[in-house]
Image (cartoon, rainbow, N blue to C red):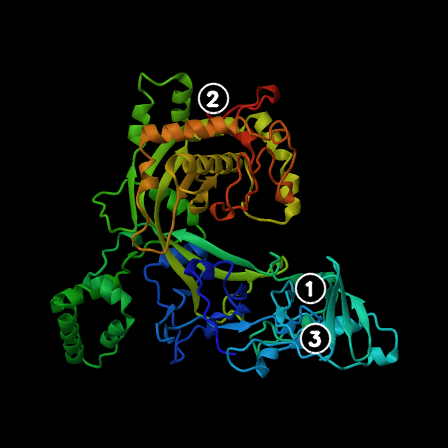
Amino acid sequence: MTSELIPIRLSHLLGNSGVGAIVRGANWLVVVQDTRQWIDRQGISAGKLIPYVERVRAALGIEEQLREPPVAKELTNGQVDGTCVPATRFPSWMRCPACGAMYRLPWRNVQPDSAPRCNHQDCRRRSELEQVTWVLAHPSGYLADVPWHFLSHKDAREAAQRNCKVQDQLRLIERGYEERILRCGACRAETRFRGDERVGFGQGRMQPWTKDDLVPPIEAAEQGDKNLAQVLVINDTRVYLPVAESVLVIPPESRVRKGTVVDRLYRNSGDRSRIDTARTSLARKGIIRMLATEYRCKPNDIETALADLARGYPLYGENLTPGQLRESEFKAFLEVLPDQREDEDLVTRNRSDEWRELGMAVDLNTNEQKIIHGVCHLVRVDRLKAVKVFKGFTRLGGEGIVPPDIVGKSDWLPAIELYGEGIFLALNEDRLKEWEQTPAVVSRLNRLLPRFAQSGRNDPNPVTTRFMLLHTLSHLLMRQIESEGGYPTASLIERLYCANAPEPMAGILIHVAVPDIAGSLGGLAELSEPRRFLSILIRALEHSRWCSLDPVCSEHEGQGPGLLNRAACHACALVPEPACEYGNTLLDRGFVKDDAANGLPSFFGVT
């Protein structure tokens, strides 16, 4: 059969449709191949290099370069312009929906643009075959076809059945909704197929598309439940869990002037190499004059740009501390930058003074004044850029991350640039310290911590009362922004800044991010106008006090995944999965509203 082109958004290619994911096309299920195959016709990595990401790489603790995935489009004549991300048809087995006969790689035996059909002698319908919907996944990240022949003979009692080697006479027969019988037509061995069997993976290929990358013999020989692979339905979330992180671009990299001589030289390593490899001073001057003509500048401008690069442009020797991701972003939002340009990658307007002035307005009541005093910083974010980096994936809850190239030898990682706008706020640190030390607040958190420890998760680390307050307030604000601003919650993204020591943080960024460099239309940033934001915050706090499922919701000791939520459900605090950093867990309206009966105070002091 001919190849099938499946359109995928770049953001999805770094998410649930990334390397190692099973993707459903119009005709086939396929698995996305690793980044070693993302090459053009010359065998060179097809993705464009992303510049000005030294701080991003330092924050994530990675040394690899960041490249965009290759892109392609189908022309009207059916040809492809660009480089496609390759994929492999998987699972390899297909099944007749009428008689249950199973075939491996049946598409090899049909004409182009024809669908494989059942040719079993007992099948009258000759139905089109369907790919099976089960795969074999391993905690180490391996993926393979279900060992159908092995499973069909695992309960064999007769010697002839145990010694049967016939692979092409298997049938998977469905009896009712849940009962499935896997049968070998050659020896009549059969077993009940549950669809969740656990077996050893063996020393096969690590992934369906790899040829030389085999499971290490030592690992293949290991025994025990932890090393067993499991049969799973392809849409089971345990089959594939992408691991990606986003980092905001902040000064000085966000302030780079695009199109300048130093910017062009920074981006063009080939031009720099030509200058550096010049054998004589005269040859070097000739190359610089030629580049000056190409860049439409003076030779002295090239020399000045080279000097800037030698001094460490654009960071100029700034000391980058690995892992300090949120701390640097938090400081960037609070810093008032002079002479900001609209084309910078982080454009903010600090409205904290206007916010505090609003707190002194005579037309505000006591509760409104308390709410204003609870927020010490309010920032309008007119433009931001985030870099989303795909680090790899896991399967079946495995601890190790499988890198995008499978073997961990590549010098680059897939990444995309996202543009948007948002609102940033930071809570009053003095009031927060007083609130989080209240015995009733600490006691409420302590009842949740054992469940978090049992979940095996390590993010956030640690879970604190301040985190629970920030996270729940963030969700309440997003839901209210949807009501008042018209932005669907699924398009919003939260980003929390939370730390107790050594540098305390208590901030929330709610933003949108799209691949279009033009960003969004500005409606979200407009909501940071102090009176309008006060209205949103007041209503969000009002909604924290009551849920349509109360009193059941408010009195819950644990609900949601891992019972990691308390007073938080779909009716009051949950948001669509893309909007939440923590999988809609670790939420509790009890940390936002007051509960006089249990001595639990409201952070904002609203009664």
Q: CA distance from mark 2 to mark 1?
A: 53 Å
Q: Earlier in the sequence, mark 1 or mark 3?
A: 3
Would you name the residue on which mark 2 appears?
Answer: 606
Q: Position of residue 84 (x, y in %)?
A: 42, 71
Would you name the residue on which mark 3 appears?
Answer: 124
Query: Which one is nearer the viewer's eye here, 96 or 334?
Result: 96
The amino acid sitting under disc 3 is Arg
Label 2 Cα crowd, 10 Å radius (few <14 / some 14-19 / many 20+): some
- Whether 361 is drawn above or below 98: the answer is above
Query: Helix, strand or loop at disc 1?
Result: strand
Please indicate whether residue 235 sits to the left or right of residue 344 in the image.
Answer: right
Q: Position of residue 80 (x, y in %)?
A: 38, 74
- Whether 42 is drawn above or below 152: the answer is below
Label 3 Cα crowd, 10 Å radius (few <14 / some 14-19 / many 20+): few
Please report contact status of discs 1 and 3: CB closer than 8 Å, yes or no. no
Query: Which quadrant holds residue 397?
Result: bottom right
Q: Residue at x 41, y 79 (%)?
A: 43
Query: Which quadrant holds residue 373?
Result: top left
Eye-nearest disc, 1 or 3: 3
Residue 505 seen in render: no
Q: Residue furthest right?
A: 158
Eye-nearest disc, 2 or 1: 1
Would you name the residue on which mark 1 appears?
Answer: 231
